[in-house]
Amino acid sequence: MGKGIEKGVESRQRILRVALELFSERGYDGTSIEDIRQAAGFKSKASLYTHFQSKEEVARALLQQIQVRQQDFIRQAIAGIENEPFRRFVAVGRAFIEWGMINPREYAFCFLRIQQEILVRGQESYTDLDSTQIFVQLIKVLRAQGYPVRQIADVALMSMAVGLISRAVIDRHAFGTVSLGEKVQQVLEACFGIIFAEPIVLPEKP
């Protein structure tokens, strides 16, 4: 990679990092492209526009980057797990919750952007990288295999579970001094109470 390209990548990452900080502190509507330019240390709008043409373009790139990192985290968590739907569902759930607890700002930004898109455009998912689609697919499989999945539409079930997870991520300090693993387990058990009509025993974390 040439120095010019490398510098461009570093500048782009600085913009995204600063944008996440500002969106987290002020909200999307409370942040302007000028705020991002100044905080990222660009001397002129033209220099910033060589990377992004608008605040919306910055937000979309940030969302995509976050979702890719989230997907990578989930893939690593389920690597080596046999192709058994229930165990994969549990592993994906644990990874999804753990990632949110570790990266609350990234999770919150991602969640709010997707919800805004659903509200405005009526879409089920903002992008094909939306990790909740993995859950929906596995719920369909579990239902077909006879697991006691509640008689509620799969997407609605997942929406309720993600709402619970999102609240837990925001209120993660409310859990007290319990470990990250215990927090994840507690939230996962609560999600299973939403998804399944009967108690389900969770397998031990491998």
Image (cartoon, grey):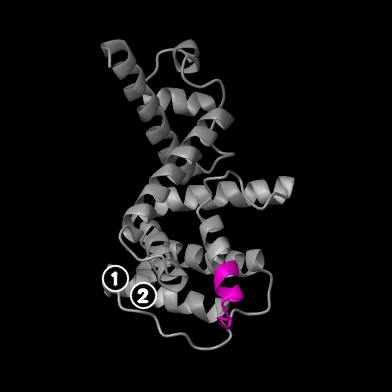
| Real-space Cα separation, disc 2 to disc 1, in angstroms | 6 Å
Between residues 156 and 171, which one lies in front from this camera angle? 156
- Residue 79 percent coordinates (x, y): 32, 57
> Residue, x 54% and y 35% (percent of image)?
60
Q: Can residue 24 be seen in this snapshot?
A: yes
- Secondary structure, mark 1, is helix
Q: Nearer the viewer, residue 180 or 36?
A: 180
* Residue contact between numbered discs 2 and 1, judged by CB atoms under 8 Å: yes
49 in relation to 151, above or below: above
Q: Quadrant of the N terminus?
A: top left
Q: Is residue 175 left or right of residue 131?
A: left
What is the secondary structure assignment of the residue under circle 2? helix
* Res. 103 visible in picture: no
**Residue range highlighted in magenta:** 140-148
Which mark identifies residue 185?
A: 2
- Residue 15, given in percent of the width and then of the height, sits at 41, 28
Q: Picture quarter containing residue 171?
A: bottom left
Q: What residue type is labelled 2?
A: Gln
How packed mark 1 is, by other alpha carbons closer than 10 Å (few <14, some 14-19, many 20 or more), is few
Numbered label attached to residue 181: 1
Count residues near mark 2 (Cα–Cα under 10 Å), then give few for <14, some for 14-19, many for 20+: some
Residue at 64% across, 63% down:
155
- Looking at the image, residue 166 sits to the left or right of residue 178; the answer is right
